[in-house]
Amino acid sequence: MLSVSTPALEQLHSSLLSSDNTNKCFRLVPKDESTLTLKYMEFEDSDETFELKGRTVLALPEVLVAYCEHKNLDIGTDGGLELA
């Protein structure tokens, strides 16, 4: 299972505060063959989801669960999100 730090969840949550659409969150999706990116979009029932303060802030598509099984999403040294 993907591990997501509390600071990363807080950063994602604060980015969603201006949106009233609770059906949308940040979803990890492939950007190209070797890169993942976050997109603001609706999450799917089959997604693994991460919540903070009662709101889904991050969704991981079922096809990426195995790839992210031992990875951690956290805040990097530059202040941005980092998947390691």
Image: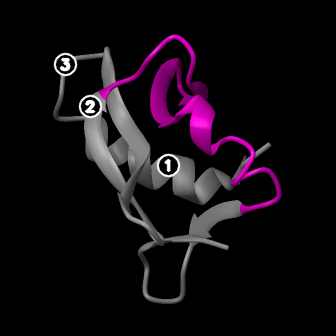
Q: Tell me which amino acid carries mark 2.
A: Met
Residue at position x 58%, y 27% from top?
Answer: 49
Residue ID at (56%, 24%): 47
**What is the number of the mark on residue 20?**
3
Q: Earlier in the sequence, mark 1 or mark 2?
A: 1
Q: Quadrant of the N terminus?
A: top right
**Which is nearer the eye, 66 or 75?**
66
Q: Is residue 59 left or right of residue 22?
A: right
Tell me the residue that label 1 is attached to: 10
Q: What's the amino acid at mark 3? A: Asp
Location of residue 25 with respect to 71 vertically, above or below: above
For badge 1, the amino acid type reads: Glu
Residue 10 at x, y = what percent?
50, 49
Q: Are marks 2 and 3 in contact (CB under 8 Å)?
A: no
Q: Is residue 53 magenta?
A: yes
The relative height of residue 80 versus residue 74 in the rendered view (above or below) is below
The 10 Å Cα crowd at callout 3, few under 14, some 14 to 19, many 20 or more, is few
Q: Secondary structure at mark 2?
A: strand
Query: What stretch of residues is rendered in magenta?
Result: 42-71
